[in-house]
Amino acid sequence: MAAHSAQLREQPEDLLKVSAYDRASSMLIALLVLVGIAVALIVALWLTTRNFRRPKLQSVVVLEEEPGTQNPPGSARDINPPGVEELDDLVEPDVQDTLAAVTEAVSTIAASLNAIDGAVATRGSGMGDNRKRGNGDAIPRHERWEVKYTSTTLADYVSQLEFFKIDVGAFGGGRPGVDYVYFENGVAKKRALTNPEEDERIYFVWQGGKFQQYDRSLLGQVGVPATGRVIMQFYPKDVENHLAVLEQEKRGARPLRDIQKTYFGIQGGKGNYEFYVINIEWRR
């Protein structure tokens, strides 16, 4: 009887003991709680630093030129620009020497939206200038656009041409069609187009400077003769559209006909170049 009473007294004490299983499970639960709190803090930190606003995408659309004056065919307001077939006449030695003396300018290029489509449309036929008819008086792009290059090295210049998919071309000099040089991974490649009418891109013609010599050098690298030829740069349609959008944003509410000259530049580094409007000169 005494032994039985002792066993009864020990039972409550045994129930209050913490077993190894209890200790392990409580530690595991505490660890899970700590991990959960840490994850929650990390998620909260990520959410507070995350920008969920969708970036504003710039629309690239073809901006229609405001129409020009209603000049009937053959009524010239300005001297008619030469057609593509007449460019060869401009590179005769005596004419070229004369132009070189006049165009000792900075390294800029003036847009020639005579481009190939405008020049082919007129073909030097004396049918008036290429301004569209209408009640506006806007200066066309080929007369008001200039692009200024500021690259310090040929390699950087080539990177810009490749980034924007700009082709360097040579025309005239007794050779038919247009010879092009384009770039892939920094390597110059060439192609030719026997019928210039098929190229409807806007092109730019150099006014002089070291970048014109760069283009001649690049043409020479792929075996394209450049001596006595007109050197041009052909811009893709989407780049032309982008320049028009930038010009529109810069001029704001002012009408297009108020613009005398728009100067574009290139900024940024390799793989991240962008055009911007340097300045707009307004008509007086």
Image: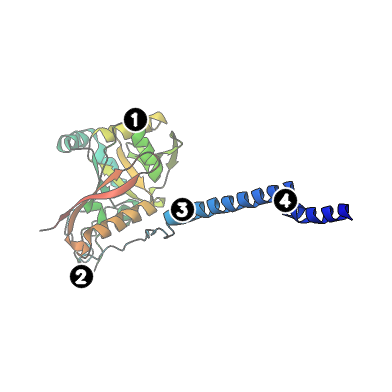
Q: Are marks 3 and 2 in contact (CB under 8 Å)?
A: no
In the rendered image of this protein, does residue 134 appear above or below residue 91? below
Closer to the camera, 208 or 149? 149
User: Secondary structure beneath disc 4?
Assistant: loop
Dot 2 alpha-carbon crowd within 10 angstroms: few under 14, some 14 to 19, many 20 or more: few
The kind of residue tagged 2 is Asn
User: Which numbered disc, 2 or 4, marks the residue that appears first in the sequence?
Assistant: 4
Q: Residue at x 35, y 61 (%)?
A: 62
Label placed on residue 135: 2
User: Which numbered disc, 2 or 1, marks the residue that appears first in the sequence?
Assistant: 2
Spatial CA span between label 2 and label 1? 45 Å
Q: On the rendered structure, is 264 left or right of 58?
A: left
In percent of width and height, residue 13 lies at 74, 53
The kind of residue tagged 4 is Lys
Q: Are marks 2 and 4 in contact (CB under 8 Å)?
A: no
Which residue is disc 4 drawn over?
A: 17
User: Secondary structure beneath disc 3?
Assistant: helix
User: Secondary structure beneath disc 1?
Assistant: helix
Instruction: Please tell me in which quadrant of the rendered image residue 154 appears.
Output: top left
Which residue is disc 1 drawn over?
A: 217
The kind of residue tagged 3 is Leu
Which residue is disc 3 drawn over?
A: 45
User: Which numbered disc, 3 or 2, marks the residue that appears first in the sequence?
Assistant: 3
Dot 1 alpha-carbon crowd within 10 angstroms: few under 14, some 14 to 19, many 20 or more: some
Image depth: mark 4 or mark 1 in front: 4
Spatial CA span between label 4 and label 1? 92 Å
